[in-house]
């Protein structure tokens, strides 16, 4: 008999954001597949959970998918977690979920924290239509091209960005969407220095240019209703 693959979201900063169901599943499963075992050990030891772990990160993903599928076929209950947030969202997991479905293995997804949903709701930008793009291409020319393709959608555009590229990326947004488009930088969500930097692209650019350094984790959200841009 096949086992079950549980997909469990973990906190993106504040440990209180783990759900009761997530804790129960982590305690009851046979094995936890995690991105970085050291990171997951911190979380598990905080909640006094001790379980066998196997590493499952992007570089060994394909090999580990087969290994985990074998164990699921033997009837094991396996929980997939990533370092933070929801597995499969800009994190490993999608292939394992797809292959489990193909093999008729039950996949149970537990709802929980994800940075982009938290950022979208707190941004105040329209939530009725949005597009989440994960990480955009790093090279400025390619990023600009990607953004230009999204620019006429009339939806809130959401993407992840690392702190050392924030200023350059907001400058590219200025070029693509113009000074008056609305932007929100959601920084360090659920953590001590959580901040939403909201305004037009011009205002936000001015704000961050005047800062010494922009540290932490970021989600960028843009909404432009200027059809001429
Ligand atoms: N799986 C995660 C999720 O569900 O949100 C995303 C993992 S992705 C590798 C990491 C990126 O998510 C970071 O570079 C940052 O852009 C965003 N992120 C994660 N935690 C965040 C936080 N607390 N505040 C703002 N952005 C965050």
Image: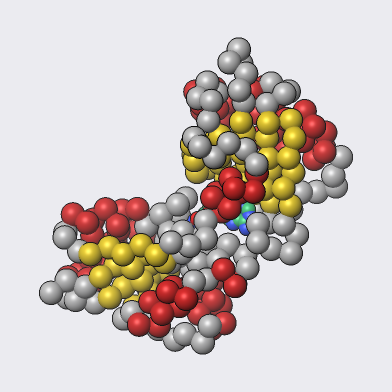
On the image, the x and y values in percent for residue 175 come to 67, 22
Q: Residue at x 58, y 62 (%)?
A: 12
Q: How many marks?
A: 0
The residue furthest top is: 228
**Residue 74 visible from this viewpoint:** yes
Residue at the outermost left position:
1
Q: How is the image coloured?
A: secondary structure
Residue located 85% across and 47% down the image: 212
| Image spot of residue 179 (x, y percent) | 73, 23
Q: Nearer the viewer, residue 83 or 221?
A: 221
* Residue located farthest toward the front when viewing the structure as drawn: 128
Residue 166, percent from left and from top: 69, 41
Residue at x 54% of width, y 50% of height: 117
* Quadrant position of residue 197: top right
Query: Eyeballing the image, is 207 above or below 181?
Result: below
Q: Is residue 52 left or right of residue 113?
A: left
| Residue positioned 64% across, 48% down in the render | 122
Residue 80 relative to residue 90: left or right: left
Looking at the rendering, the quadrant in which ligand 1 lies is bottom right
Relative to 119, is 86 above or below? below
Q: Quadrant of residue 102?
A: bottom left
**Residue 66 vs residue 208, the one in the foreground:** 208
**Is residue 58 at least partly visible in the picture?**
no
Q: Give the quarter of the figure containing the C terminus.
A: top right
Near-viewer residue (189 or 38): 189
Q: Quadrant of the N terminus?
A: bottom left
Q: Position of residue 27 (x, y in %)?
A: 40, 83
């Amino acid at each position: 008999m096949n086992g079950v693959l549980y997909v469990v979201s973990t906190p993106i900063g504040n440990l209180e954001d783990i759900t009761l169901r997530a804790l129960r599943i982590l305690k009851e499963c046979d094995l936890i597949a995690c991105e970085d075992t050291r990171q997951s050990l911190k979380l598990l030891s905080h909640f006094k959970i001790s379980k066998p772990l196997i590493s499952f990160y992007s570089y060994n993903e394909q090999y580990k998918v087969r290994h985990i599928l074998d164990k699921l076929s033997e009837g094991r209950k396996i929980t997939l977690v990533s370092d933070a947030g929801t597995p499969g969202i800009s994190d490993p997991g999608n292939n394992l979920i797809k292959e489990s479905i193909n093999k008729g293995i039950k996949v149970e997804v537990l709802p929980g924290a994800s940075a982009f949903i938290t950022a979208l709701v707190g941004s105040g930008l329209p939530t009725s239509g949005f597009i989440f793009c994960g990480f955009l291409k790093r090279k400025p020319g390619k990023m600009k091209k990607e953004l230009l393709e999204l620019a006429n959608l009339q939806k809130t555009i959401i993407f992840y960005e690392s702190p050392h590229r924030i200023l350059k990326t907001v400058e590219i947004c200025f070029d693509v969407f113009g000074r008056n488009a609305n932007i929100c930088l959601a920084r360090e969500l659920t953590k001590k220095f959580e901040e939403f930097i909201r305004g037009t692209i011009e205002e936000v650019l001015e704000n961050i240019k005047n800062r010494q350094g922009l540290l932490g984790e970021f989600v960028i959200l843009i909404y432009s209703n200027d059809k001429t841009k």
